[in-house]
Each structure stands twice: as structure tokens, then as C-alpha cells.
Image: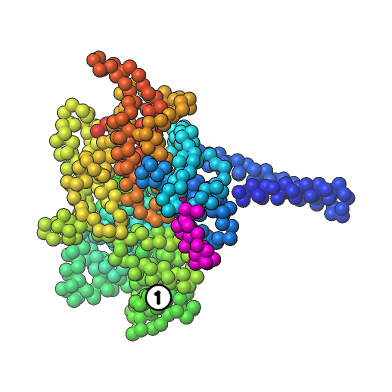
């Protein structure tokens, strides 16, 4: 709309300049020609840009809910032009008798009219007035007013059919989201010299899925791994390295078990006073960039990186490492910036600052002159906002860090690094992983569960499940069995996490997540392979399906065809909701609903008709096969966003 308006203005300006030339007004002819050329160039650029945008939008899946909101927004504005920001509530209907969608704005408008204008008008009367002002559009067949003032919306079948055809021809295209924004996501973030444990599982899985969603929607995404790779613990690790492997500078130390190495150095730090003093000296030498100590630090970091990468490879996680050490040189300037603005107080030698609305101050410098997590988090926040120019900044960190992060964000606002009305800075908090005893997930000995052990157990159990169903004997080749094992094991672990509201704790249970009934990855992966097999078993290949998508009209006369078609097209509104609230379980719930809706359709509508005696194919109902293909296409994209890899045969 903005581009169209600018094109009109530019066209008018070109005409004005032509008139100047015709009327012989004073500006030099050369100047007019230059100005005219610039305007024409800008006009051509805008027209081309608009054409590209329209072409992109034409391929995008339409968010039907958003379309209806626009339509009802216009209707409400026409019916009640004096109302400022009237409520606009459009939701999918829960039962077919109430239509396909409902507009429930009338009740809210009744309250506003009563409060602001002292007018007592019934919601039903308001609903009727809104209905009369609905503009001409391509998606609404009819509206009905029900109960106290609900407006039931019935969609046009040809509109839904056309959108499904577009989906089949163009693939699953992201909903139009406007200007391409920069998104920075901070997730996973384990500590160097410590093994990744089950506590890192949620941040890693949720963060990866969020990145995939924003990337699919067309955002420029920077995936950051804020490793704990700096600090006082490195003093004891380097001191222990010097004692255990004195020739570490020339011979690479064979540190096999870094966790054990960390525990040994910690025990010495806690019990040997001389070692403790030397550890503190090592920290000073490391922070002063002594080359030998930097080499020792790099060796320890490299051992950890290799272990982390094994897990990232298993779970198909992509990250750019940018640990605390990256921000170390910036911390001095951060302290000075807050001091210069008068926010810093000295408390018992420490430099602290109170942020309005938060009772606990941030400590930005210790009494010994060292920096803290508060300082590094502030430095990271500033770098991401001011250097990376993030429009959206998301921290996927456990709920226990909520107060700390909100304080850091508020400090960034206080000093003027960002305006929350312009830049979105969000903490995507999550609960803890519980064992089946509803306590924190631990091993039998009470230790934290190592993440690599958890993944290996998942692989073992997935193979046991496949063998229980005798998939290894007659159904799958050895290669297909291995692919199915990996898909089920890692898919089930990811889905079990993502299918729960991230704000809540959840109980980790291999038995539940590998169950092929109910809302699990095992069920959905199996449903997907069945759907993909329908066309294959009917000897219909991809080329035939593409040709049919161009030529066939999708008939949606049966109630189950209609229900499935509408469910498929809700995908963009599901994604839009998650982009706003960052709650990925909504996508899992949708995929489960789509799979069960498909089952209803398949049980009631013959896609391929066979002779009862011979089993020979008698008739292929191509429009129904296209509904199968549309379902599978949307499910595949949903899996991709969740980081789950389906297989063709299971």
C-alpha cells in the first residue's frame, strides 16, 4: 500500500514537471530533465519492487484468520466510525454448526459503548450492524448471527479449494511478514569443561526450533551459543593442567574425560590452599593474555567443543559460538558507560547499580576489579543491539534466570540501548525436566543425567520398539531400519519437549514418547509415512500429482474433505501465533489435530477404489490424493520447523 501510494505521488510529480516545461516556468530545462530522470528511475524501481512483492505474496499461504480480521476491521470501522481501537476477535469455530470462523467483537463493543457513550445497545444489534457493513471479499460465503451476538462465518468452498491448489503448486510458502528483520537467538549455552546434561536439552531443542521458524518466515537469524568459556574456574583448570601434563605446550594432552578432570581440579581447589593461590594467579595471567595461559585455555575449550559437537550433530543443531570471552574486552567500556551516566554506586568495594523496579542490584565490578556474569550479560546485550542491530532478541534460558535477565534488559532500556516499542527483547523461559517420580531428572546414583547417555538410550529403545513390531524382518532394509531408528529416537526426544508448554516443567518418559498412539512423534511419523504411501501404492508419482494440482479442481463436498481442507489452511495462522508468543507446543497440537483429521477423512472418503475380489485398482479419486499430498506437505514443513526428520518407510 505504501509503495502504491508513492507511485501515485511520483507519477503526479512527473506530470507536474512536464507542465513546468510546457508553461515555460523559470527552472532550467537541464535541471528539469535531471529531476524528471531521477523521479522516473525511482518510479521504475518502485514498480518493479511492488511487482516482486506481489508475486511473492501471491505464492504465500494466506492467513485466513488475518484476512477475516481485516474484513471485520473494515466492517466495524464503517459501522462505528467514532470508536477508537474497537475489539477485534476472530477465532476458528469449535463446531461445524457454528460455521468455520466466529467474530466475537460485538460483546466487547457493547461494553465500550456503555462506558464511553452511556449507550445501552444489545450485542445482537451490534452484530447485525457489523454484518451489514462487511465489504465485498473473496472468502466469505455467508454470515449468521447466533446467540447473544456471535457472528458465524461460513467460508466459500471455491476460495478454500483455490488456496489448496496454490499450496500444491507453490509448496508451503511462509506467510507474508513485511520487512525482513534481524533476529538474534541465544540458546544452548553450556559451560566449558562441564558435560552437557539433561538441563541443556530444553534450551537446545527449543532454541533450534525457534530459529527454524523465524528462518522459514523470512527473517535474518543469528544463532548464538553463549558458552561459559571465561571466568575464575579456568584458573584451577589451568593449574591442574600444568601439574598433570607439564609438557602441554608441545604435546597435546590426552584429556579423555573432561568432567573427571574438572572434578579433580575442583577437589584440589577446595582442599589445597597452595593450589588455590596458584589457581588465582593463573586467572590473572589468563586475563592479562599471557600466551602460555591462552594456549592452555584454548586446549581445554577445544576438548569441550568436540564433546558438544557430538550432541549437536545427533540433534542436527546449528550454532555460532560466541562465549563470554568474546565480550571480555568490552566490559571495561560497559562499566564506564554506566558510571558516566551516574547509575553506579560503590558498595564495600564493589560497583553496583540498582535498576528501577528490581530490588536486587546488578554487580558490574567485583571489589578485586574483576567482572561478573552481570557485566558480560550487559556487554552481550549491547553488542547484539548496537553492533548486530537486532530487531528481535530472544534468550532461550531456564525460568530460574528470569529476574536476572529482566533486570539486565531493564538496565539496557534505562541507559538507552533500545526502545521496547521498537525492538523486541524477550526471555523465552522454560521449566525443568522431571523424572517419572516428578522430581528433577537424575540418575539412580543421584547424578545429573548426561545428555549423550540420554541420546544413546533413546537410540537403543527406538530400535527395540521397531524390532518388537518386526520391522527388521520383512518391512525394512538394514539402511531403512537405521534411518527409522534415528528418526524415531531423536524425533521423539525433541517432540516430547516441544509438545509441552515450555513454561511448565515436564516429565521425561521414554515409554510415553515412544508410544505410537496419542500426541507423540512416533504416532505422527508413522501417520506421515502412511499418507506418503497412499499415492505410491496407487502408482501415482510426483509428476502426475503436479499435473493434477494444475488441472484438477479440489472438490470439498464431503464434510470430512471440507474439514481437512480448512485444517490444512490453518497452518499460517498457527505459525503467526508462535512468532508472537514463542510457544511451540501450539505447532505440535496442530500437527496432531491435522493427523487425526486426516484419519477421519481417510476412513470416510475413498482415495483409491479397489475391486473387492482381485484387489485391482478400479478408480483413483485424484482430488482426494491431492488432499493427501497437501496434508503431507504441511506436515513435512511442520516437522522441519520442529527439527524432526521423517522417513519414507517405517
**Residue 105 falls inside the magenta stretch:** yes
Q: Residue furthest right?
A: 24
Q: Is residue 236 above or below residue 512?
A: below
Q: Is residue 172 above or below residue 323?
A: above
**Residue 350 falls inside the magenta stretch:** no
Asked which colour scheme the image uses, the reply is rainbow
Q: Quadrant of residue 533?
A: top left
Q: Along the horizontal axis of the image, is 342 left or right of 456?
A: right
Residue 522: give x, y in percent of width and height: 24, 40
**Magenta residues (range):** 102-125
Q: From where the camera sits, is residue 638 visible?
A: yes
Closer to us: 649 or 161? 161
Q: Is residue 281 above or below residue 218?
A: below
Q: Residue furthest bottom?
A: 348
| Residue shown at the point (41%, 30%) measured from the top left | 557
| SS for callout 1 | loop
| Residue shown at the point (20%, 71%) measured from the top left | 269
Q: Residue furthest top?
A: 614
Residue 630: give x, y in percent of width and height: 39, 34
| Residue shown at the point (24%, 33%) measured from the top left | 650
Closer to us: 85 or 369? 85
Q: From where the camera sits, is residue 65 visible?
A: no
Closer to us: 560 or 464? 560
Reading the image, the residue beneath label 1 is: 357
* Label 1 crowd (10 A; few <14 / some 14-19 / many >=20): few
Closer to us: 340 or 601? 601
Residue 179: give x, y in percent of width and height: 53, 51
Q: Along the horizontal axis of the image, is 318 left or right of 76?
A: left
Amino acid at each position: 500500500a505504501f509503495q502504491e501510494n508513492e507511485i501515485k505521488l511520483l507519477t503526479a510529480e512527473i506530470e507536474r514537471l512536464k507542465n513546468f516545461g510546457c508553461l515555460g516556468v523559470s527552472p532550467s530545462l537541464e535541471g528539469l530533465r535531471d529531476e524528471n530522470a531521477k523521479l522516473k528511475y525511482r518510479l521504475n524501481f518502485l514498480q518493479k519492487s511492488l511487482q516482486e512483492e506481489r508475486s511473492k505474496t501471491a505464492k504465500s499461504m494466506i492467513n485466513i484468520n488475518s484476512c477475516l480480521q481485516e474484513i471485520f476491521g473494515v466492517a466495524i470501522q464503517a459501522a462505528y466510525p467514532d470508536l477508537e481501537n474497537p475489539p477485534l476477535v476472530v477465532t476458528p469455530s469449535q463446531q461445524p454448526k457454528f460455521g468455520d470462523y466466529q467474530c466475537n467483537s460485538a460483546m466487547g463493543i457493547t461494553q465500550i459503548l456503555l462506558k464511553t457513550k452511556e449507550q445501552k445497545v444489545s450485542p445482537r444489534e451490534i452484530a447485525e450492524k457489523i454484518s451489514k457493513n462487511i465489504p465485498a471479499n473473496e472468502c466469505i460465503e455467508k454470515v449468521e448471527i447466533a446467540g447473544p451476538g456471535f457472528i458465524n462465518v461460513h467460508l466459500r468452498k471455491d476460495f478454500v479449494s483455490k488456496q489448496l491448489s496454490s499450496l500444491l503448486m507453490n509448496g508451503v510458502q511462509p506467510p507474508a511478514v513485511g520487512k525482513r528483520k534481524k533476529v538474534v537467538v541465544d540458546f544452548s549455552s553450556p559451560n566449558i569443561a562441564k558435560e552437557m546434561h539433561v538441563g541443556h536439552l530444553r534450551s537446545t531443542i527449543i532454541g533450534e526450533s525457534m530459529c527454524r521458524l523465524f528462518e522459514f518466515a523470512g527473517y535474518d537469524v543469528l544463532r548464538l551459543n553463549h558458552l561459559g568459556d571465561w571466568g575464575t574456574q579456568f584458573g584451577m583448570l589451568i593449574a591442574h593442567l600444568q601439574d598433570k601434563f607439564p609438557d602441554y605446550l608441545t604435546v597435546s594432552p590426552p584429556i579423555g574425560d573432561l568432567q573427571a578432570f574438572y572434578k579433580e581440579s575442583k577437589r584440589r581447589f577446595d582442599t589445597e590452599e597452595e593450589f588455590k593461590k596458584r589457581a588465582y594467579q593463573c586467572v590473572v595471567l589468563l586475563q592479562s593474555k599471557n600466551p602460555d595461559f591462552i594456549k592452555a585455555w584454548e586446549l581445554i575449550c577445544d576438548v569441550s567443543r568436540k564433546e558438544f559437537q557430538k550432541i549437536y550433530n545427533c540433534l542436527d543443531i546449528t550454532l555460532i559460538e560466541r562465549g563470554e570471552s568474546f565480550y571480555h574486552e568490552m566490559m571495561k567500556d560497559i562499566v564506564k558507560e554506566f558510571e558516566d551516566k551516574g547509575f553506579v554506586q560503590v558498595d564495600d568495594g564493589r560497583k553496583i547499580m540498582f535498576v528501577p523496579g528490581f530490588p536486587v542490584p546488578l554487580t558490574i565490578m567485583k571489589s578485586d576489579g574483576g567482572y561478573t556474569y552481570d557485566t558480560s550479560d550487559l556487554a552481550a546485550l549491547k553488542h547484539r543491539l548496537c553492533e548486530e542491530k537486532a530487531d528481535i532478541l530472544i534468550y532461550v534460558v531456564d525460568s530460574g534466570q528470569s529476574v536476572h535477565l529482566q533486570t539486565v534488559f531493564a538496565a539496557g532500556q534505562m541507559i538507552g540501548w533500545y526502545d521496547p516499542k521498537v525492538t523486541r527483547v524477550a526471555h523465552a523461559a522454560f521449566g525443568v525436566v522431571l523424572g517419572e517420580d516428578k522430581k528433577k531428572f537424575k540418575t539412580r546414583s543421584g547424578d545429573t543425567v548426561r545428555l549423550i547417555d540420554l541420546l544413546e538410550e533413546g537410540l537403543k529403545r527406538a530400535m527395540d520398539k521397531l524390532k518388537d513390531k518386526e520391522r527388521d524382518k520383512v518391512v525394512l532394509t538394514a539402511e531403512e531400519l537405521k534411518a527409522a531408528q534415528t528418526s524415531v529416537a531423536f524425533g521423539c526426544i525433541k517432540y516430547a519437549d516441544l509438545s509441552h508448554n515450555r513454561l511448565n516443567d515436564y516429565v521425561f518418559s521414554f515409554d510415553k514418547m515412544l508410544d505410537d498412539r496419542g500426541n507423540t512423534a512416533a504416532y505422527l511419523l508413522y501417520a506421515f509415512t502412511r499418507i506418503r504411501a497412499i499415492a505410491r501404492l496407487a502408482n501415482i508419482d510426483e509428476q502426475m500429482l503436479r499435473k493434477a494440482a494444475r488441472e484438477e479442481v479440489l472438490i470439498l463436498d464431503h464434510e470430512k474433505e471440507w474439514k481437512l481442507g480448512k485444517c490444512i489452511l490453518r497452518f499460517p495462522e498457527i505459525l503467526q501465533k508462535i512468532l508472537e508468543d514463542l510457544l511451540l507446543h501450539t505447532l505440535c497440537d496442530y500437527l496432531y489435530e491435522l493427523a487425526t483429521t486426516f484419519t477421519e477423512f481417510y476412513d470416510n472418503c475413498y482415495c483409491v477404489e479397489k475391486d473387492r475380489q482381485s484387489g485391482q485398482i478400479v478408480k483413483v479419486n485424484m482430488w482426494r490424493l491431492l488432499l493427501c499430498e497437501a496434508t503431507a506437505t504441511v506436515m513435512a514443513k511442520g516437522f522441519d520447523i520442529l527439527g524432526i526428520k521423517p522417513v519414507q518407510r517405517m
